[in-house]
Image (spheres, rainbow, N blue to C red):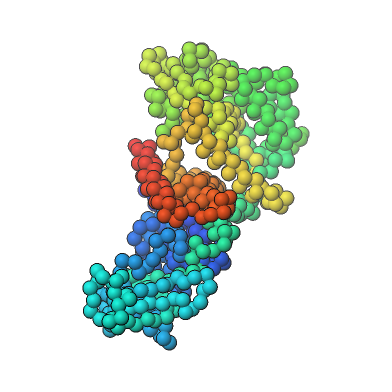
Amino acid sequence: MNNMPMFVYYILGLLVFIIVLMVIVAVHEGGHFLIAKKSGILCHEYSLGMGPALLHKKRKGGETAFSIRAFPIGGYVSMAGEDPEDDMLKGFTKCRLIIENEKVVKIILDLNNPKYREYPEFYILDYDLIGTEKCLDSELFITVTSDKIDESRIKELKDDENIQKLTYQVDRRCMVNVRKKEEIQIAPWDRSFNNKSWPKRFFSVLAGPLMNFVFAWLIFLLMGVFFGYADTSSTKIAEVQGPALEAGLENNDVIYSINDIELSDWSSLQVAMGEIATGTNLSNGASGITFDGKVTVKYYHQGDTNDLRTAIVTPQVYFASSDLIVKYDNEKSGVIIANSEAETKLEKAGLKQNDKIVKINDIDIIGIDSILQFYSTQISEGTKELNFTVERDGVLNTDEHIVKIYTLSDLDANNIDPINVKLGVSTGSSFQFVKLLYMPFKQTGDASLQIIKTLRQLFRKNSSIGIRDLSGPVGIFNLFTRLVQGPDAMYNILYWTGLISVNLGIINLLPLPALDGGRIAFLIYEAITRKKPTPKVENTINTVGLIILLAFSVFIVISDIIKCF
């Protein structure tokens, strides 16, 4: 698969992007829809995507239209009564009526609709399509006339006894034909969102974000079932690659010690590598990583306790704050940059692969141990940039290379270790029923905490994470394009699907206008003050919030596109 042309990956990435986003949105809107229906709220439309409708279907006799729209970003459930100006006949003076069993079952406002031209036209004099909390059928009516009248005087003429008026009872499931193919069911008092009890309104709004957390939990559960969990009970190697492979280790070897620290399980191996990452002596008094970046690994070949072997491994050393990977080069007698990927902080600072690092912030870098000690001791929370002095092609480069780095709190917010020393070994995984009982909850909680920490970093004074670091649809598309190229594509796609679902849930809970959290804030205000916010004020705030949200979304999209170049 790695030999495929790049455009194939873009197509696969686009397909995965659309499917994942639509499923997450479908789950979110499904939460709103299910609870609203259970609460007796009339839902006019359940839509996936925004913009022009590509598919618009309504089940015969059903009251909700299901649609798929052109732009696979977002979606909505249109509930009756959400809009304070939810008056379908407002602004219309003429209509046609379809009457069955002495009740109006359809009101046609599109007079040019050829399907209904056989029905006579009427002037609308008065109507009530909502009724009261008594919910009596007789409350719903429409009064019309076929007499020729002055449309500008309809309000005055509705009480004129000289005009022949016809008053009809309106069926509670009456449809209104607004445009040629658009028909909307009327919402009597008891079917309106605004008239439902506080708990029903609250949970109809809250259900969307909650379903995102439930969906993420389900994704993590499926990952546990099909991919299992890491087997950390021993130090048996399931897969060997990179440095360990070059040193001669093989799959099924069992690591006995690292730099004379005896290991009991995979956690003890990680602890030992964490100590090595500090560039200092280990807890047993043995030396840490050597000058030229090597560690001594003793292992049982293929798990045979009678066959103890020794390998000298040169692990990969990664410094997350500056996107830096280094290794010791014997020919250059120094530490060189091993990064090969583009779009790193190093590339932006003018640094290149195989540059020999001479100094960082005027501190000499001689070996791997010294650069480990520098990153362990010289970087504090307030450090935002590093000044690299490098030698390129045997010549000291006099250019200034200022690398903007992530702060320690930024890394912590994303659960990233500042320094990683990796041997190139990994443990196996297996189905573990006990872990399956709690790990999906833990993973959902960890994902939530990670997103909350990242949001908090946006507003910290010394944070290196800003608005421009956020990603929107273009950024997510680029992410999936990279994921489909990896060896663990399905696992990573599922993991990020869960993470994005949690992200959507948390973002929607923020108390911002036009988001679910904004509507929840109004409902909490109502619960505290015992009075509803003025509908027009709430609608105005939500409209302004929506405009700001759309503008912000455009900014994020433009920012994502700029990052691509």
As drawn, 216 above or below 325: below
**Could you say which is closer to the camera, residue 305 or residue 177?**
177
Q: Is residue 177 visible?
A: yes
Quadrant of the image occupied by residue 199: bottom right
State the image quarter where residue 240 is shown.
top right
Instruction: Identify the residue at horizontal 44%, vertical 16% (top origin).
Output: 389
Give the residue at x 44% y 28%.
345
Rendered location of residue 26, percent (x, y): 49, 59
Please report the residue visible at 69 percent of the width from the left and 36 percent of the height from the top: 266
Badge count: 0
Image-based side of 492 in relation to 226, left or right: left
Decide which of 468, 352 is in the foreground and name it.
468
Let me know if residue 494 appears in the view.
Answer: no
Up the image or down, 323 lies above or below 71; here it is: above
Furthest-bottom residue in this view = 101
Q: At which x and y percent is residue 167?
A: 37, 81
Residue at x 54% of width, y 50% of height: 525
Residue 280 percent coordinates (x, y): 64, 19
For residue 154, above or below residue 318: below
- Identify which residue, 424 or 227, lies in the foreground: 227
Does residue 554 appear left or right of residue 270 in this picture?
left
Q: Is residue 488 above or below residue 300?
A: below
The quarter of the rendered structure image containing the C terminus is top left
Q: Position of residue 420 (x, y in %)?
A: 58, 29
